[in-house]
Amino acid sequence: MAEQKSLNELLKWSIINQATEKEDASAENATIKPMEKLDPGLIEAILGKSESQMMLEALQVIKNPHSTDDEKDLAWEDFEMLIQQIDNACNIENMKMWPPILEELKNTNPIYREQAAWVCGTATQNNPKAQAAFLKEKGLQPVIDLLADPEPNVRAKAVYALSGAIKHFEPALKEFKDVDGYKTLVNILKSDSNLSLVRKIVFLMNTLLIQDPSSSSELAALELIQTFGALLKKHMDDEDLVEKSLVALKTFFEVSSTPVPAATLASIHPQVLEAKEKYADYILDKESWAQLEKRFA
């Protein structure tokens, strides 16, 4: 009904402001009636809101203390969907939205901490401009802090946000290293019982080793190899985690120029052999297995 009313109003406006052939031929000294302005609300009803406007309205709902939980949940979902578009993600900075979003990383409600981290990860993923803005607004440390959040879902989204912020963006990776980020990740691998989170971190660790081979020496000092060995021993039945751990271990050996003590290799060799016996036909190819086993010869 509202849409029909808008169309009727548009038709009325068009008729009023359209000159007929007879009116066009009126006397030169005839009074010319000024064109009526089109109601901005009518334009919006016809063309729809801009995505920037929708982002702004969603954020207003998120920040409104009187919004219901359902309204906020929907607003977060809408906002995250909109910023999947790179231009919209860049507009977070242009519209000065980063500060209110980053505030939500410290919300007392874990659901909103999780959703804020989700938005941070989506906005920065493969988007150097958004990564730079996120770093400038000091978003990295709050995300790292969330890796110790008591809620598993928040920790998982924090890994997602961290990955988006530092992958293929050297300034953020440097800051991550300066605040002992690698130590934080290795400690999580050693202590966190949430296997979904552990898998995500092992995958991220492999990506960072490829991106930053020099980090292998730091990770060697943090006993990353022993940590992978412990994961294999404890979770040998978890095929996905075993595969991710072996891939990361292989990457470590490929990029590292730091000699690995024989005792360290001997300590994890049994786990590698067991993994090969159990999963040789499912994970890694023959060449990868051969390259990995060379390290233990």
Image: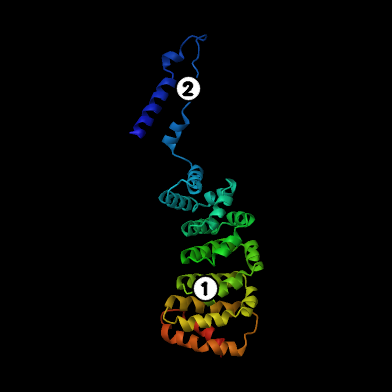
Q: Position of residue 222 (x, y in %)?
A: 61, 78
User: Residue drawn 63% across and 62% down?
Assistant: 172
User: For residue 167, what is the image quadrant?
Assistant: bottom right
Q: Quadrant of residue 249?
A: bottom right
- Compared to residue 98, the image places residue 2 above or below, namely above
Looking at the rendered structure, which numbered label has been put on residue 202?
Answer: 1
The local crowd at label 1, few if under 14, some if 14 to 19, many if 20 or more residues have their Cα within 10 Å, is many
Pinpoint residue 16: horizontal percent, then vertical percent.
Answer: 42, 20
Q: Residue at x 40, y 22 (%)?
A: 15
Q: Position of residue 45 (x, y in %)?
A: 42, 35
Q: Regarding mark 2 in the picture, which secondary structure is present there?
A: loop
Task: Look at the image and tell me whether residue 286 can be seen.
Answer: no
In terms of depth relative to the viewer, which is nearer, 255 or 79? 79
Mark nearest the camera among 2 and 1 is 1
Query: Please, is residue 18 above or below residue 234 in the view?
Result: above
**Could you say which is closer to the camera, residue 143 or residue 287?**
143
What amino acid does circle 2 point to? Glu
- Give the mark nearer the N terminus: 2 vs 1: 2
Relative vertical location of residue 87 with respect to residue 288 in this rendering, above or below = above
Q: Kindly report the distance in space between the C-alpha atoms of the residues bearing marks 2 and 1.
A: 64 Å
Q: Looking at this view, is 136 or 73 the one in front?
A: 73
Which image quarter is the C terminus in? Answer: bottom right
In the rendered view, how is the structure colored? Answer: rainbow
Q: Which mark is residue 36?
A: 2
